[in-house]
Image (cartoon, rainbow, N blue to C red):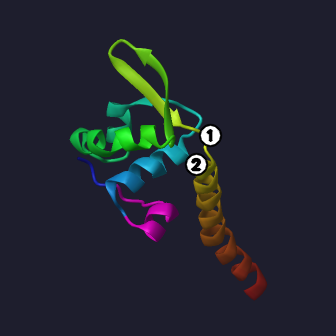
Amino acid sequence: MKVKENKSFFLMQFGDTPQLRVLDFLIGFHFFDYPLTEIARESNVSYNSIKVFFPYFIKSGIVCKTRKIGKSDYYKLNMENEFVKNLIKLDWLLTKKNVLEPIQEQVVCA
C-alpha cells in the first residue's frame, strides 16, 4: 500500500482509521460512484478491511448502490441521508477554518 503524504483536515481532526479514510475519500469525491476495489485503493484501505465495515455503511444508509457493471457493484455517498449532509458540512467547516483563518490573520497582521 502506498503511504499518503497529505492528510485531510477531516482525518487530522478525527483520526486516521480505515472507516474514516473511506468516508474522507467518498466525501471528497461525492459526485461519482466507485466499485469497492477502487474505494479501497484510493483511500489506502485493504480490500479485506473494507469488506468488514462497508456492509454497515450500506445498512445505515451512508452509502448506496448506484449500479452494477459486470460483477462489480458501484457505490456513492447517499446525499439524501441527513448524517452524510452534516458530514459534508463539517468537512467544509474544517477546511475553511484551517485554510481561510490563517490567510485572514496574515492580511490583518500585514
Residue at (28% x, 54% y) in the render = 3
Task: Give the labeled residue for mark 1.
Answer: 79
Q: Are marks 2 and 1 in contact (CB under 8 Å)?
A: yes
Residue at (44% x, 62% y) in the render = 11
Viewer-side residue, 101 vs 74: 74
35 within the magenta span: no
**Label 1, residues with CA under 10 Å away: few <14, some 14-19, many ≥20:** some
Q: Position of residue 1 (x, y in %)?
A: 23, 47
Q: Position of residue 98 (x, y in %)?
A: 60, 71
Give the number of the disc on residue 84: 2
Which quadrant of the figure has residue 55? top left
Identified by mark 2, the residue type is Val
In the current view of this chain or complex, which residue is farthest to the top? 70
**Label 2, residues with CA under 10 Å away: few <14, some 14-19, many ≥20:** some
Identified by mark 1, the residue type is Met
Residue range (magenta): 4-15
Question: In this rendering, would 80 be left or right of 8?
Answer: right
How many labels sit on residues? 2
Q: Position of residue 42 (x, y in %)?
A: 37, 42
Q: Secondary structure under badge 1?
A: loop
Q: Position of residue 16 (x, y in %)?
A: 36, 62
Vertical placement of 91 versus 35: above or below?
A: below
Residue 110 visible in image: no
Tell me the CA gap for discs 2 and 1. 6 Å
6 within the magenta span: yes
Residue at (46% x, 46% y) in the render = 25
Question: In this rendering, would 100 be left or right of 57?
Answer: right
Considering the image in quadrants, where does the C terminus appear?
Answer: bottom right
Residue 39 visible in image: yes
Vertical placement of 3 versus 26: above or below?
A: below
